[in-house]
Image: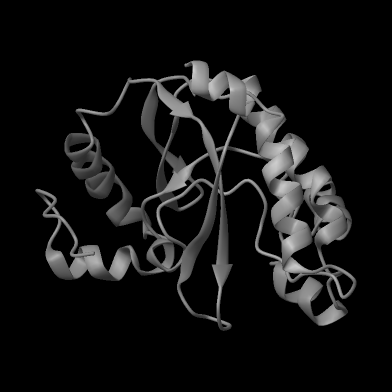
Amino acid sequence: MEAPPVRGIGILDIAFHTAVPRRYGFHAGLKAPFRLASDVAEPMLLRHLMRFAGSHAPFDLPGLDIVRVGSTLALAPALPCEAVSGLASAVVQEFDAFRAPFSEAELERCDPGDLTAMQFANLYRWGNPFVMQEFRFHMPLTGPLLPGEIRSFERALREHFAPYLGRALEVANLALFVEDDHGAPFHVHSLHPMGRVTARRSA
């Protein structure tokens, strides 16, 4: 998609600083990308995901805000949300059996060297440092920003997203993203509505 104009940020800066999140698509990740285990076929994953989504009712996130996540900026709930944290933990646990274990080389690549003990344990157990108590629901807007850039970007993004900030956001679907080739952009493979079919029809 063509990038929309953002007052206060040049078009080249937008292209450069959104390169990382653009590859993954605008989303909020619940489980980090993984390779399927050798004894798992894609239809098995899809059937399980369909059942899983149907067993969890939709819910509303608290109002959104522009937040800092490390050196990046993202949209995230302004207040903690137990419903989304619980969903994320359930996703990580439920689908871990479908994930191929990391090799030692992959583990080393995923460890930047500054993880806490809890994050390091999460990486070895679940393939991602930032799960369970370390999870923070967010929708990335930028890649890493320099200290001198982050304030100006934050102001510009807060103004750009002003019509949406503070508004509740319904979480009603789970999406499966795929990466066709290593390093290629991710795309939505399938969308799985949450809640029982009968309940969705009556609504």
Q: Is residue 13 above or below residue 61?
A: below
4 relative to 1 in the view: left or right = left
Residue at 47%, 65% in the rendered image: 187
Q: Is residue 105 above or below residue 190?
A: below
152 relative to 187 in the view: left or right = left
Q: How many marks?
A: 0
Residue at 53%, 24% in the rendered image: 200
Residue 113 visible? The answer is: no
Residue at 55%, 79% in the rendered image: 180
Q: How is the image coloured?
A: one colour
- Kindly give the residue lying farthest to the top in the view shown: 202
**Residue 107: image location, x then y, percent:** 80, 71
Q: Quadrant of residue 169?
A: top left
Q: Is residue 145 above or below residue 173?
A: below
Q: Quadrant of residue 80?
A: top right
Q: Nearer the viewer, residue 4 or 180?
A: 180
**Residue 170: image location, x then y, percent:** 45, 26
Q: Nearer the viewer, residue 51 or 104?
A: 51
Residue 78 visible? The answer is: yes
**Residue 79: image location, x then y, percent:** 50, 20
12 relative to 41 in the view: left or right = left
Q: Nearer the viewer, residue 202 or 91?
A: 202
Q: Is residue 121 above or below residue 186?
A: above
Residue at 51%, 45% in the rendered image: 28
| Quadrant of the image containing the N terminus | bottom left
**Residue 121: image location, x then y, percent:** 87, 52
119 relative to 195 in the view: left or right = right
